[in-house]
Image: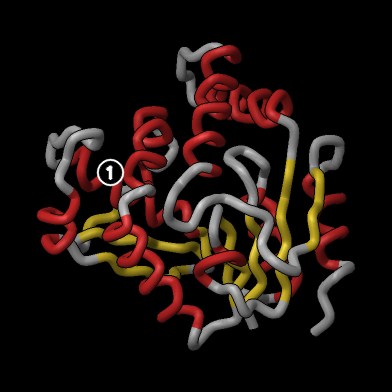
Amino acid sequence: MIITIDGPAGSGKSTVAEEVSKKLNFIHFNSGTLYRAVCCYFLDLGLDAKNIKFETKIKKFKLSVDYKDGKQIVLVNGKDYSAHFRDNNVSVLSPIISVNKTVRDTIDDCQRKFGKTHNLVVDGRDIGSHVFPNAEFKFYLDCSVDERARRRFKEEKTKGDKISLKEIKQQIIERDEIDKNKTYAPLVVPKGAIVVDSTHLSIEQTTNLIISHIKI
């Protein structure tokens, strides 16, 4: 069974997907980490993600996903970049990488292959609309820009990153524009998805609301 949770950056979809998967004893598949891993790979090569010719580089790495002790592990050419997934430069460059069709096709294939043999809760920006359009249950997790910025700012402060709330809000606004205006698999409310606004809800409340709509 596939359960999808789509939504804009910072809406809490990964956190909620993790909680939903625990309650259902499903695997949480975080699609965003695949994009971040690819981004880290390009950065590790010292390449400028804004100008790189993806089509000539995409063939040179292998993307794989595994699980260990319930934790998703994404490897690019056998290397684990998870320690850098939340670096701000990765957050800024990931959407630039994500618009490339070659990159997206590679990641989509990886997700679909994994979904054939596992019960998944998958979160992302085009999961219910593009990657798993026939998923049994689909949700769209929304949240105000101000609240998403506040949550991300709190997260960055715990890491010691020196970035202002204003800067984070602007980054989120720009990310929304990129995601919603992609010519290939843009961010939309998937057909048949249940929209959940988490602006004024806790993680537990949001999780329970989603669970209430799932019949297994």
At label 1, which amino acid type do we have?
Answer: Cys
Residue beneath the point at 50% across and 69% down: 131
Residue at 53% across, 25% down: 156
Q: Residue 211: give x, y in percent of width and height.
A: 83, 67
* Front residue of 57 and 212: 57
Q: Quadrant of the C terminus?
A: bottom right
Q: In this rendering, is residue 36 above or below 184? A: above
Give the x, y percent position of residue 39.
30, 44
Residue under pointer 1: 40
Image location (x, y in percent) of residue 165 = 60, 15
Q: Secondary structure at mark 1?
A: helix
In the image, 20: left or right of 71?
Answer: right
Q: Nearer the viewer, residue 179 or 162?
A: 179
Residue in front for this viewpoint, 18 or 98? 98
**Which quadrant does the N terminus fall into?**
bottom right
**Image point 18% across, 35% down: which residue?**
51
